[in-house]
Image (tube, rainbow, N blue to C red):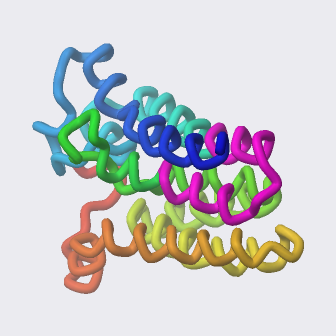
Amino acid sequence: MLKWLWIALSYFIGSISFAYIVAKLHSGIDIRNYGSGNAGATNVHRTLGIKAFAVVSILDILKGYFVVFIAMLITDNQLAIALSALAVILGHNWPILFNFKGGKGIASTLGVVAAFSFLAFIILVVLMAVIIYITRYMSLASLVATLSAPILIFFLSGDSYYFVGITFVLTILAWFTHRQNIIRLLDGQERKIGER
């Protein structure tokens, strides 16, 4: 019973918008009214700078990690753990606490991956850093990382097909929330890091 309650609670934990909270504490603004209007780390970076971005990213990663880590302590039911992972990302992207206007779930997805396989998490962070360094496109780095995540989890998380499957679902969610970024990338109109 507890594991199913945790899945529901995971959504509400995901709904805690650290981008909104940090922006309010940092500058007294609603981050959803600035930049892209997205309540996520990338928009915080463009609007408030690298320090606020780092704080939001770390908190969002920890949010995803915490939910899955606690789920693993509560139960060894891999389906319940996977559904907790899904719930925290759904909460982040469409938070009931913030009128369903959230982020795109990349940092929290990285946190989920870290709980499944810390090595996979490290590889994805390095991969994103390399892509950002070469192209300066945060969105491209996010898309490549999420596409790579299920493959890494397949090879690094043991025999858990639930973890591979839910990571694939999170990849689909990430690409869905980045659909406008994909169009801009294809059109050559996507903003690079450093462009406001």
Residue positioned most to the left: 33
Total marks in image: 0
Residue positioned most to the right: 158
Q: Quadrant of the N terminus?
A: top right
Q: Position of residue 148 (x, y in %)?
A: 62, 77
Look at the magenta stretch and give its main secondary structure.
Answer: helix
Q: Position of residue 33 (x, y in %)?
A: 11, 37
Q: Is residue 107 above or below residue 27?
A: below
- Relative horizontal placement of residue 106, taking residue 25 as reference (left or right): right
Q: Is residue 23 above or below residue 28?
A: below
Residue positioned most to the front: 1
Task: Let me know if residue 52 is in the magenta part.
Answer: no
Q: Quadrant of residue 116?
A: bottom right
Foreground pick, 77 / 117: 77
- Relative horizontal placement of residue 154, taking residue 95 as reference (left or right): right
Give the residue drawn at x 57%, y 77%: 168
Give the residue drawn at x 26%, y 19%: 24
Task: Let me know if residue 82 is in the magenta part.
Answer: yes
The region drawn magenta spans 65-88
Give the residue drawn at x 50%, y 61%: 132
Q: Position of residue 195 (x, y in %)?
A: 25, 51
- Relative horizontal placement of residue 130, taking residue 164 as reference (left or right): left
Give the residue drawn at x 32%, y 60%: 192
Q: Is residue 6 above or below residue 28?
A: below
Q: Position of residue 84 (x, y in %)?
A: 58, 52
